[in-house]
Amino acid sequence: MTLLHRASEKRSLPLMESLGVDTVRERLDEVEQLIAGKKVPGPGFFVSFIRPPNDYRPPPARQQVAVRTQVAAPPRLLEAEANPDQAARERFARRSAIERAQETVRSLRVVYGNRLDAGEYRKLGDVLEVEALDATLLRAEAARALTMGTCDNQVALLRVQLATFS
């Protein structure tokens, strides 16, 4: 089973359980942007990027750090830092239907890999863009299937749902 860009289940599942699926998904999106148009590195790179993300990001400027320590963060930011999954869900909800559809298809590609073909992913994106299926629910089902090891069953159910759309 390939979970994080061909990384083994033994390496992928602990990351998703400890960091949360949304955090892993955000970090994967970030690394995909970094390597866009370049040779795709091996699975170890993706796992390493997710574990210590600051190794691959530029450090914040010293002036920015000083400002952050002097200015108190608004309460909402503190809440978001306390629960990164909730903050990710809120950011997802604020996006347009097309952006949510694109992000959901990207996320499901990470979880389901080649269990669905390109045509099925395209159809899924089209259905999600018109909000005929609930993107949030599909992402939650995919996360649950990943942690429970039932991705094949979930893909079969998703195919049944897609078959109802022309």
Image: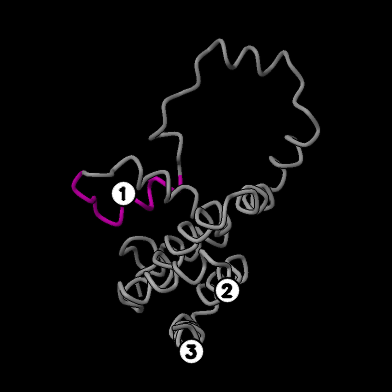
Residue 64 in percent (x, y) is at 57, 15
**Residues shaded magenta:** 38-51
Helix, strand or loop at label 1? It is: helix
Helix, strand or loop at label 3? It is: helix
Q: Could you tell me the amino acid type at mark 2?
A: Ala
In the rendered view, tell whether residue 114 sits above or below residue 154: above
Q: Residues within 10 Å of mark 3 (few under 14, many from 20)?
A: few
Q: Could you tell me the amino acid type at mark 1?
A: Phe
Verify whether residue 157 appears in magenta.
Answer: no
C-alpha distance separating marks 2 and 3? 14 Å
Quarter of the C terminus within the rendering: bottom left
Residue situated in front as seen by the camera: 81 or 101: 101
In the rendered view, tell whether residue 101 sits above or below residue 50: below
Q: Quarter-wise, where is residue 5 in the image?
A: bottom left
Verify whether residue 48 appears in magenta.
Answer: yes
Q: Which mark is residue 132?
A: 2
Closer to the eye: label 1 or 3: 3
Q: Which mark is residue 162?
A: none
Query: Residue tagged by mark 3?
Result: 160
Q: Could you tell me the amino acid type at mark 3?
A: Val
Residue 88 in percent (x, y) is at 62, 50
| Residue depicted at 46% across the width and 23% down the height | 59
Q: Residues within 10 Å of mark 2 (few under 14, many from 20)?
A: few
Q: Quarter-wise, where is residue 143 in the image?
A: bottom right
Q: Which mark is residue 45?
A: 1
